[in-house]
Image (spheres, rainbow, N blue to C red):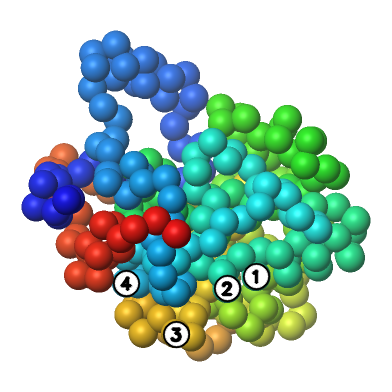
């Protein structure tokens, strides 16, 4: 039986502005690490589990320290949506999150006869991933690409792991690129106005542009600026009914967010974040119920 005490400190992925590292440098670092036998990320017990835990669906804990009981699986494609990069096996989630994904797909299909590309959801039992995300742990997060597609085959062909998706932000980091258009605005608007959505993380330049363009700013309140998120947006849903151990985030502040708090993201301080400490910190201890989820029988 697994116990949390058996897991030591973990090197977590630290985010930075999109495309902030030269690809050649990244490949060089990766190559040296592989040749020297150094692990780029410590494996987690959650990433080793391949099937959901049996039980009624429950989101447990918070998005960055939690787990998921009774997860459901998102099909490879459906009306208006396609799940990409499925080799990661991060296509599990709480049923309410999957309901949102399917609803968003239908809304895109009705509006444009295209498909939304759905990225990472959660692992079969949620929990910490061994790469890329600190969040996505309790089944209430989903990544949605801004770029739409015409078919599942086109999506799978155009989204190999090593390929960067088109950025919606220009190279200056302040304005939008030619890839941004009405389709992207409408997709984001549909997601943000869904009643179950708590907040959406987007690149600051995207929010800034919408603050300047939108006559009705009420829906912009849910758009929270964050580093990266220039090619996809990160949707976080509210804690679902029946999940009494789900831990919600602090409420989104009142107002549109088109104020000094947004302006900070374009300051020198925000654009040149301090380097993280080299001291390894142990990950937080998950809620007690997650031990039971990890060891529970399969569905």
Q: Which residue is mark 3?
A: 242
The residue tagged with tag 4: helix, strand or loop? strand
Q: Residue at x 25, y 37 (%)?
A: 42
Q: At 54% across and 61% down in the image, what residue appears?
A: 72
Q: Residue 156: image x %, image y %?
A: 71, 35
Residue marked by disc 1 = 99
- Contact between marks 1 and 3 (CB within 8 A): the answer is no
* Disc 2 and disc 1 in contact, CB within 8 angstroms: yes
The residue at which mark 4 appears reads as 61
Tag 4 near tag 3, CB within 8 Å: no
Neighbour tally class for label 2: few under 14, some 14-19, many 20 plus, Cα within 10 Å: some
Between disc 2 and disc 4, whose residue precedes? Answer: 4
Can you see residue 256? yes
| Cβ atoms at labels 4 and 1 below 8 Å apart | no
Q: Which residue is mark 2?
A: 96
Q: Position of residue 35 (x, y in %)?
A: 29, 11
User: Which residue is depicted at the point 74% across and 83% down?
Assistant: 216
Label 4, label 1: how far apart the Cα atoms are: 21 Å
| Foreground: disc 4 or disc 3 | 3
């Amino acid at each position: 039986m697994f116990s949390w005490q058996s897991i030591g400190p973990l090197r977590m992925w630290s985010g930075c502005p999109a495309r902030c590292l030269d690809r050649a440098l990244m490949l060089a670092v990766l190559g040296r690490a592989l040749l020297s036998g150094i692990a780029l990320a410590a494996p987690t017990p959650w990433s080793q589990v391949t099937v959901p835990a049996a039980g009624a669906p429950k989101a447990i804990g918070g998005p960055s320290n939690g787990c998921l009981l009774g997860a459901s699986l998102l099909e490879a494609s459906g009306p208006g949506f396609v799940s990409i990069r499925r080799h990661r096996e991060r296509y599990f989630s709480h049923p309410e999150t999957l309901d949102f994904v399917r609803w968003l797909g239908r809304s895109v299909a009705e509006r444009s006869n295209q498909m939304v590309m759905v990225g990472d959801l959660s692992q079969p039992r949620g929990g910490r991933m061994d790469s890329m995300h600190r969040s996505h742990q309790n089944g209430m997060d989903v990544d949605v690409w801004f770029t739409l597609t015409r078919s599942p085959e086109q999506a799978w062909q155009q989204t190999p792991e090593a390929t960067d998706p088109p950025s919606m932000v220009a190279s200056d980091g302040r304005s939008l690129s030619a890839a941004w258009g009405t389709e992207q605005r409408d997709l984001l608007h549909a997601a943000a106005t869904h009643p179950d959505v708590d907040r959406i993380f987007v690149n600051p330049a995207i929010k800034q542009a919408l603050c300047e363009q939108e006559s009705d700013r009420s829906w912009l309140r849910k758009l929270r600026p964050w580093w990266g998120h220039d090619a996809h947006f990160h949707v976080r849903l509210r804690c679902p009914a029946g999940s009494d151990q789900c831990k919600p985030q602090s409420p989104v502040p009142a107002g549109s967010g088109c104020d000094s708090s947004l302006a900070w993201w374009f300051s020198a301080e925000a654009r040149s974040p301090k380097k993280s400490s080299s001291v390894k910190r142990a990950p937080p201890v998950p809620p007690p119920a997650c031990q039971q989820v990890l060891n529970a029988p399969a569905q």
